[in-house]
Structure formats: C-alpha cells, structure tokens
Amino acid sequence: AYMVLTHMPDDAKLTVDDRDTSVVDVIIGAKYNGIRPASEVAVSAGDRIAPAPGCVPLTQAMADIGVSIAPSPSPSAATKKTKKSGTATPTAPSTGY
C-alpha cells in the first residue's frame, strides 16, 4: 500500500483496514489526473519505505491499549499425537482471550 501511495498525487490518502491480504484498493475521484511520472517517485522496488505518521507495529499498538498477543506456537508445539492412532492432529493455538 505504501508503494502504491508513492505513485499517487500528494493529496492521496492511505486508509489501513483490517484485511490480512496484500490487496490494495485505489478509489479514484473526479479530480484524478493520473499517477506520478516514474521520474518523480522517490522509491523503487526493494527500497524500505517510511511508514505513515502515527503508524506503529501491531505489537506496540496492542500494548498501548493493554492487549497482549500470545506468540505463535512452534510447528512442533502446534501438533500433538493422539494415543489411539498415533497420527498427528493440529491443535488450535491459544489466543490469550
């Protein structure tokens, strides 16, 4: 999303939602005149992009509101063997809620 934003006019706005995909929606209004010319874009593929003002890592945002996130279990901890069949069955990780 940040890379797409670098190609948009200065008055473009980034709105982050709760989707966990890499899909980016671009809504174009009547005043849209096109993307910036490549010569005006200050970043290229592979460059690190500074986050938008106020954007913080999820762990920090959750800590700021008093919510802790349980670490994801390791693959070996997320699977347990059943005594009857001896086959591995996945177990749901604890979310801490």
Image: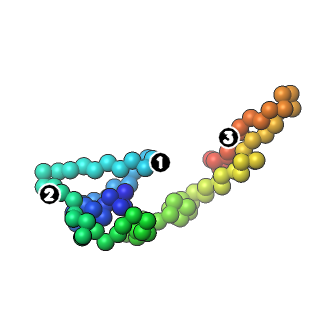
Q: Amino acid at mark 3?
A: Ala
- Please tell me how crowded label 1 is: few (under 14), some (14-19), or many (20+) other residues with Cα within 10 Å: few
Q: Residue sitting at 43 percent across and 69 percent down?
A: 48
Residue 21 in sight here? yes
Which residue occupies the foreground of this view, 80 or 96? 80
Compared with residue 10, is residue 96 higher up or lower down, i.e. above or below? above
According to the picture, the residue beneath numbered tag 3 turns out to be 92
Residue 36 occupies quadrant: bottom left
* Residue 74: image location, x then y, percent: 71, 51
Query: Which comes before the other along the chain, label 1 or label 3?
Result: 1
Q: Amino acid at mark 2?
A: Asn
Horizontal relation, residue 77 to residue 16: left or right: right
Between the C-alphas of marks 2 and 3, the distance is 49 Å
Residue found at the far right of this picture: 83
According to the picture, the residue beneath numbered tag 2 turns out to be 33
* Residue 11: image location, x then y, percent: 21, 63
Q: Residue sitting at 42 percent across and 69 percent down?
A: 47
* Residue 44: image location, x then y, percent: 36, 67
The image quadrant where one finds the N terminus is bottom left
Horizontal relation, residue 75 to residue 56: left or right: right
Describe the element under mark 2 as helix, strand or loop.
loop
Describe the element under mark 3 as helix, strand or loop.
loop
- Please tell me how crowded label 3 is: few (under 14), some (14-19), or many (20+) other residues with Cα within 10 Å: few
According to the picture, the residue beneath numbered tag 1 turns out to be 20
* Residue 66: image location, x then y, percent: 56, 60
Q: Amino acid at mark 1?
A: Asp
Query: Which comes before the other along the chain, label 2 or label 1?
Result: 1
